[in-house]
Image: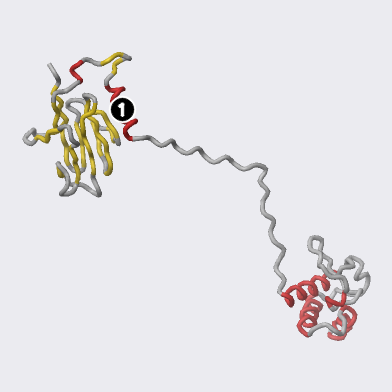
């Protein structure tokens, strides 16, 4: 067995083969005792590698330290050894080819705050396409606690409701709270800059308030009141 292996080594490898390559080929031959010289080398290409997908860029077989009699398996071992010795990178994986580039989703349009408020006021002042009665032009408005014991009037300036010392109405709650109420064209607008606000059961960011609307702001509850012009 040893003699056969050594005979095949001398048949398949040149005298220039490094000891490391000789050891790899010897281990292969010991694991595959059926490997012989009959018909060997017929499947090997002239570039010195039997693989179908990878072709080395060299010509002489001497670079692989193999003879023309080396079978494909020995050529593969020698070729892998040749690559490791030169630290050649593996062939790059081709990137997938896209037949077409997907269109990016459209960006949401920017909404101007004044335009949005004007739109809300216009819609609130119309009923079935006609102007609402003059009673919508209120003479005054305020928010009051549930018991009605405390009132906070809404003047021509903003009524600021929040969880800090700089607000007109202070409320408790989780996180930041910043709510504004002010008159515009006879109606009263509400804008939520921060926090969660519920008006008559609906969570909102903008609203046009009506008389007796219930406002839940933070941990507090208020009723919006609007005096109509007689």
Please name the residue that numbered disc 1 is placed on.
118
Answer with the quarter of the image where residue 190 lies.
Answer: top left
Q: Is residue 96 left or right of residue 132?
A: right
Q: Is residue 175 left or right of residue 61?
A: left
The residue lying at 18 percent from left, 17 percent from top is 135
Q: Position of residue 150 (x, y in %)?
A: 8, 36
Identify the residue shown where x is 26% and y is 28%.
208
Q: Quadrant of the N terminus?
A: bottom right
Residue under the point 79% across and 60% down: 53
Above or below residue 114? Residue 72 is below
Vertical arrangement, residue 63 with respect to residue 110, above or below: below
Give how far across and how far down residue 72 sits, in percent: 85, 69
Instruction: Give neighbour class at mark 1: few <14, some 14-19, many 20+ (Cα, 10 Å).
Output: some
Q: Is residue 194 above or below residue 74?
A: above
Q: Is residue 60 above or below residue 147?
A: below
Query: Viewed as shown, does residue 167 lie left or right of 89?
Result: left
Front residue of this view, candidates 135 and 44 = 135
Whole-percent x, y for residue 79 in the image: 79, 72
Counting every numbered tag in the picture gives 1
The answer to which image quadrant residue 94 occupies is: bottom right
Q: How is the image coloured?
A: secondary structure
Q: Secondary structure at mark 1?
A: helix
Q: Nearer the viewer, residue 133 or 11?
A: 133
Q: Residue furthest left?
A: 149
Picture quarter with the C terminus: top left
Question: On the picture, is 119 further left or further right than 86?
Answer: left
Q: Position of residue 136 (x, y in %)?
A: 20, 20
């Amino acid at each position: 067995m040893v003699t056969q292996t050594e005979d095949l080594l001398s048949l398949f490898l040149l005298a220039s083969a490094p000891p490391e390559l000789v050891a790899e080929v010897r281990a292969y031959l010991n694991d595959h005792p059926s490997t012989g010289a009959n018909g060997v080398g017929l499947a090997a290409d002239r570039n010195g590698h039997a693989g179908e997908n990878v072709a080395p860029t060299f010509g002489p077989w001497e670079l692989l330290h193999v003879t023309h009699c080396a079978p494909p398996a020995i050529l593969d071992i020698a070729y892998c050894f040749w690559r490791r010795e030169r630290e050649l990178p593996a062939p790059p994986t081709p990137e997938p080819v896209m037949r077409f580039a997907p269109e990016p989703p459209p960006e949401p349009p920017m909404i101007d705050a004044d335009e949005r408020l004007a739109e809300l006021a216009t819609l609130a002042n119309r009923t079935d396409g006609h102007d609402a009665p003059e009673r919508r032009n209120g003479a005054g408005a305020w928010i009051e606690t549930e018991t009605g014991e405390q009132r906070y009037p809404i003047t021509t300036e903003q009524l600021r409701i929040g969880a800090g010392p700089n607000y007109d109405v202070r409320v408790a709650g989780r996180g930041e709270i910043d709510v504004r109420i002010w008159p515009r064209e006879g109606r009263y607008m509400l804008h939520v800059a921060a926090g969660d606000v519920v008006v008559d059961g609906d969570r909102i960011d903008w609203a046009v308030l009506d008389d007796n609307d219930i406002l839940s702001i933070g941990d507090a509850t208020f009723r919006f009141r609007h005096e109509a012009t007689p």
